[in-house]
Image (spheres, rainbow, N blue to C red):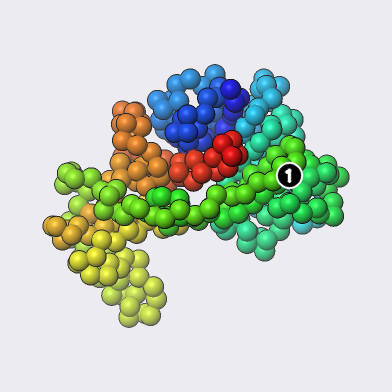
Amino acid sequence: MLKIGTDFSGIGAPETALKRLGIPYELIFGCEIDKYARASYNELHPTANIIYNDITTRDFNEVPNLDLYVAGFPCQSFSVAGQRKGFDDVRGSLFYNVASFIKHNKPKVFILENVKGLLSHDSGRTYQTITDLLSNNGGTLNSQLNIDVFNDGLGYHVYTKVLNTKDYGIPQNRDRIFIVGFNYWRKFNFPKKVNLMLSIKDILEDNVDQKYYLSDKIIKGFKKHNNRHKEKGSNFIWKPKNENDLANCIRANASLCPTDNTIIEKTTKKIRRLTPLECWRLQGFNDLEFKKAQKVNSDTQLYKQAGNSITVDVLVEIFKNIYLK
């Protein structure tokens, strides 16, 4: 049975993916600072031995050696990135806490997830610092030996790749970079793309509450705003192609504000927001899981939690290549 722990746990996509695959695990800990997301996590994953609320204050000595550690850490600037001082380069960032935990706990496998922009953040220095720190001192990066620049590197065998949700069964255009590390040498391949069998239409609810439909007043306001931008030659915020289109407007940065997740219904020709349930479906969660979280959270928080989550189906495919092949 895998011993697992997750930081920046959100609503627990890694735990959900393992359940989907029927891989038995003991959930040693979750860690989530947002109290609303933590409430949803508790409903979805009640078997956790402990739920921490802050990675920066956790006592690493409390945690046994893990088989799997997953963290969707935020992208932050490093105060002295590029000066090649190892852990001193990332001190003060939340990645420092992630790296420190890996160094202390030595999990067999880790998976880190971040926005695609990590690759270009600080002209690429942030990504380079992260991958060097993880792989230097005896490890490899994408099967290649590097010239070590960090003497205190963690020595993991690290693989990185940008994966898009739409390539793994879910109709959402969402690029994320995944960093997979092993504390032993092994060849790892990221999952191959699969044919997309679902469309947005398959994700939508049949009966939607009127509160999710945009009023004529709001629509007129959007059109006025768009017209002002057209006159200035700048980009639109809201741009349905035509009334017969079913537009999926979730952006890759997962900002789930009403102007980003609007659709035009084919049957009614009305414009509405995606519902929280639809947003959870677009992240690979099923309706039962959503209803558990809905008991303890508002629509506002449910939108936010969907937007911040790792897509379950992407993790399912990654876990298949780690544990089932």
Residue linked to disc 1:
157
Horizontal side, residue 199 vs residue 1: left or right = left
User: Residue 94, located in which quarter of the rendered image?
Assistant: top right
User: Residue 206, located in which quarter of the rendered image?
Assistant: top left
Q: Quadrant of the N terminus?
A: top right
Identify the residue at horizontal 51%, vertical 44% (top origin): 317
Q: Is residue 298 visible?
A: no
Where's residue 108, x and y in %? 69, 33
Where's residue 174, x and y in %? 46, 55
Numbered disc total: 1
Foreground residue among 224 and 23 = 23
Query: Which residue is most to the left?
Result: 268
Where's residue 24, x and y in %? 52, 25
Identify the residue at horizontal 39%, vertical 76% (top origin): 234
Query: Which residue is most to the front?
Result: 325
The three-letter code of the residue at mark 1 reads: His
Vertical position of residue 240 compared to residue 34: above or below: below
Foreground residue among 280 and 19 = 19
Identify the residue at horizontal 35%, vertical 66% (top origin): 237
Q: Is residue 13 visible?
A: yes
